[in-house]
Image: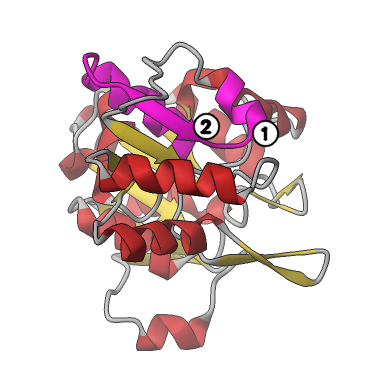
Amino acid sequence: MRDLIMNNVVDTILFDLDGTLYANRRPIKSAVNVIETLRKNNMKMGFITNTDGRPVEEIHKRITDMGFDISLKEVFTPVAAVKQFFINNPNKSCYCLVHDSVYNSLKELNMDDINPDYVVIGDFSDKISYDEINKVFRFIKNGSSMLALSKTNFYFQDNKININTGAFVSMFEVACEKKAILLGKPSKDFYNLALTKLGSIPSKTLVVGDDITVDVAGAKAINATSVLVKTGHYNEELVCKFNLKPDYIIEDITKLPDLLYENSL
């Protein structure tokens, strides 16, 4: 691994979280040691997730409570992507249709509830109402652009299927005849914002994850190298059928150091 890093072939890794580094809130095998090994070799790392209903600080605490040596600035979520987006576009304003806990973490943004440049659409399950939906609809019809924190239509929790952010984004897209900019996986905008924050470039980056439709697709979107792990959401039948193929497949995250050492990525 040291030779690869010294030769400047790979200097950054973007890790998916749930299913890749941990499952059921417990590290997968010796995943904590893998991160420690990479850090000793001065690898730049980002830890990315599509969770849009929680502040970045809450997700960071969940990870560190499991024993991972990860800093807050290394965690990248759709909420973090929104912050980075407006850092890059400081003169733009927004209206945030998000959960209150997320809204509180976005207060430093240039908020505008009259004529915003962008409407940020995330998990707003705590404030769903016709009036709120209609307010955002009018913003978009009158010219506001949409920033979607997710385009996932549903999720499972407690063995029940639940409607998700993407269904509402699709509703606004159809009603307003506009397309939203996705600031979540597998959007290239999401991955490029993460790499900008890390000071990295796609050609020297690995994207490691368990979901071929999201993690591998995201890597391909920015022309980074993809590594698929056979844990979490891995589905061999789907891997065979999917139109994109990962560059590497490994059993689990503990095999990553061997891959880096044995292959000139």
Kind of residue at disc 2? Thr
Tally of marks: 2
Instruction: Name the spot of residue 191 as percent of width and height, x first.
Output: 31, 42
For the residue pair 185 and 137, the one nearer the viewer reads as 137
Quadrant hosting residue 190: top left
For the residue pair 261 and 25, the one nearer the viewer reads as 25
- Rendered image: mark on residue 63: 1
Residue occupied by mark 2:
37
Graded by Cα atoms within 10 Å as few (under 14), some (14 to 19) or many (20 or more), the crowding at tag 2 reads some
Q: On screen, 239 above or below 57?
A: below
* Residue segment shown in magenta: 77-104
Query: Is residue 131 on the magenta stretch?
Result: no
Instruction: Name the spot of residue 263 as percent of width and height, x first.
Output: 28, 55
Q: On screen, 140 above or below 154?
A: above
For the residue pair 47 and 27, the one nearer the viewer reads as 47
| Residue at the image position 27 percent from the left and 38 percent from the top | 144
Q: Earlier in the sequence, mark 1 or mark 2?
A: 2
Kind of residue at disc 1? Ile
Image-based side of 36 in relation to 96, left or right: right
